[in-house]
Amino acid sequence: MIDLLLSIIFSVLLLINFRLHPRFGVNTFQTIILNYPVCIITGLLFLPENQHFSLDLSETSTLLAMLLGVGFVITFMLSGISTQRIGMAMTSLANNMSLVVPVIFSLVVLKMSSSFDTLNYLGLILAIVAVVLSTFKKSESDSSNKKENIDWLLPIAVFVMYGITNTTFNYLNAKYVTASGTTIPFTLTILVGSVLIGGIVLGIRIMQGKEKLVLKSLVAAVPLGIPNFLSFYYLLKALDAYQNNGAFVLPIYNIGVIVGSALVAFIFFQEKFTLLNKIGLILAVMAIGLISYQGLF
């Protein structure tokens, strides 16, 4: 259980990082790009002694993992922007409610648990409603510009992208990794893909004069990259401790992150929740239970 708790804590720390970036004038784009090398260094330090990390570009799994790394960069960017514009609690909810996608994929396609039933479908419907209600923000004035009016789409994009990347990771992990028990080396391969695409994009923007590297970005990448890897690392350890029963571990993890983020957002950042937002949070917890009740009971 301690591994699961640590995973929740480090996941909340990720969003706290994004929330603090504007306050300290940190360039979130640069920090996200630079956080991936920090993730790799952290991952190498946690690599088991009986395993090693190397890239074999002739393997299909290597290429697919690196491609998935591109998706992680896009998803992390959306999460950072959404946290700053919509809020920490709402972005966390959209992020963690995306579990409906890999859970459904696991239940229906991979056949790793009981068959999908009426309660699961009810949970899926509640999840979608929860995301919509929790991210709804009423315009403060009729003069609000179009950019502000469509900010609510950011958590929806986070929901979709996290769902796609997590589902892809679960599929690749089940197909290429589980048998050999090399999840961390596989994760490092994904991170290499993130570093490559991030480096290319950042390099192009610097050459175009749209970006200029600043020391703050490099410094901020450390407290972002370390919990970024550790949140994933301890979640994997928690799954291993519970015999890879994702239908049990993932709901607890996601509920923990949603509730923890909401509390931090309310206490430390004074984020305000409307009645609809509060209903959305409650529905989110109910939805997670309904979607994954097979593993909970």
Image: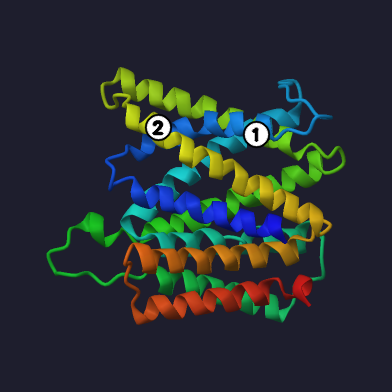
From this view, report whether residue 183 is shown above or below residue 135: above
* Front residue of 263 and 105: 263
Q: Amino acid at mark 2?
A: Val
Measure the alpha-carbon separation of dots 2 and 1: 19 Å
Classify the position of the C terminus by image quarter: bottom right
Category of crowding for the residue at label 2, using alpha-carbon neighbours closer than 10 angstroms: few (below 14), some (14–19), many (at least 20): some
In this rendering, position of residue 164 left or right of residue 279: right
**Residue 169 percent coordinates (x, y):** 67, 45
The image's mark for residue 219 is 2
* Front residue of 117 and 52: 52
From this view, report whether residue 217 is shown above or below residue 109: above
Q: Report which quarter residue 85 is drawn in.
A: bottom left
Name the residue located 31 percent from the left edge and 27 percent from the top edge. 214
Residue underneath mark 1: 43
**Residue 17 percent coordinates (x, y):** 42, 48
In this rendering, position of residue 61 left or right of residue 138: right
Q: Report which quarter residue 30 is drawn in.
A: top left
Image label count: 2
Name the residue located 82 percent from the left edge and 44 percent from the top edge. 178
Q: Secondary structure at mark 2?
A: helix
